[in-house]
Amino acid sequence: MDMVRASADTPPARSMPGMGDHPSGTALYAAIVTALYRREKTGHGGVVRSSLLQNGLWANGCAVQTRLFGEHVPHRPLREDAPNALANHYRTRDGRWFIMALFNEQRQLRGLLDAIGREDLTEDPRFATDAARKQNAAALVQVLDEVFATRDLAEWRRILDGVGITFGIVGTVDEVSDDPQMRACGGLVPFADGAGLTVATPFHVDGAAQVAPRRAPRVGQHSAEVLRDAGYSDAEIETLRARGALG
């Protein structure tokens, strides 16, 4: 939370629900499967364990290890002061954001500048070389800010896709259900009864079909079944229901 805030002067970001719990669950799953594999190979069982704290540390391992080696770990600079203007966030006319990642500048830069109507920048000495662009990154951010503010996200998406620019939309949860990639990758699947969508497991195993997810039961939905399994007769269950013991 300290490392992802906009600058050292802004409050730390607040984490979203599940950011620590889900990775910890995944780590515990990996530990269980590894232990089962060891048992299969060696016959030796064992207890596996993990912790929320250790998973948080592991997820931040790059920064922590850098510090353990005695190196400085700086906060991220303000977006306007990004060290590389071609790997930065930009805002479109309709208030949406996208992240551009032009990592092969030699191959992609000319196509980008032509597509956004600023091919003149190739002749600008401030941006003519990799070294010059890094030295004048703040100035280039300002130029691109002005350019990308002239069109809506949908139009920029079509333009950038057309010239093979690597970028990602800063999406919202409201858009997830209509995202074709979410369904194509199996991230969203219908409930077993077909009524609505739900988030699917991220694990896929060839030849093993995932069980269709079901909605959580209502309170008391399976009370009669549980009581029957416990030895109660239907008459006894109805008596309990009539007395208000069952909802």
Image (cartoon, helix red, strand yellow):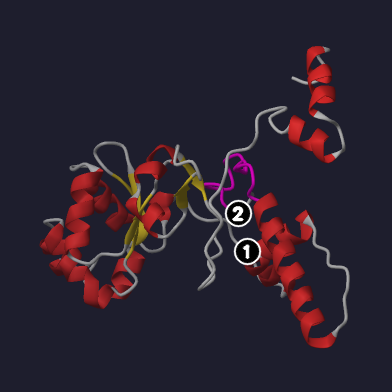
From the viewer's perspective, tell me whether residue 206 is left or right of residue 246: left
Residue 108 point in image, percent of width and height: 23, 71
Q: Amino acid at mark 2?
A: Met
Q: Can residue 85 be seen at all in this image of the molecule?
A: no
Magenta residues span: 3-19
Residue 241 pos. (x, y %):
78, 18
Dot 2 corresponds to which residue? 3
Are the residues flagged by discs 2 and 1 in contact, CB closer than 8 Å? Answer: yes
Labelled disc at residue 57:
none
Alpha-carbon neighbours of circle 2 within 10 Å: few (<14), some, or many (≥20)?
some
Residue at 83% x, 12% y: name it.
Answer: 243
- Seen in the picture, residue 239 relative to 97 is either above or below; the reply is above
* Quarter of the figure with the C terminus: top right
List the residue tagged with mark 1.
Answer: 73
Depth check, mark 2 against mark 1: the one in front is 2
Dot 1: few (<14), some (14–19), or many (≥20) neighbours within 10 Å? few
Q: Is residue 5 magenta?
A: yes
Q: Position of residue 176 (x, y in %)?
A: 41, 44
Q: Toward the viewer: 101 or 242? A: 242
Residue at screen point 39% across, 53% down: 183
Q: CA distance from mark 2 to mark 1?
A: 9 Å
Which picture quadrant has residue 15?
A: top right
Instruction: Give how far across and how far down residue 226 sits, in percent.
Output: 79, 37
Under tag 2, what secondary structure?
loop
Residue 112 or 7: which is nearer the viewer? 112
The residue under label 1 is which amino acid type? Val
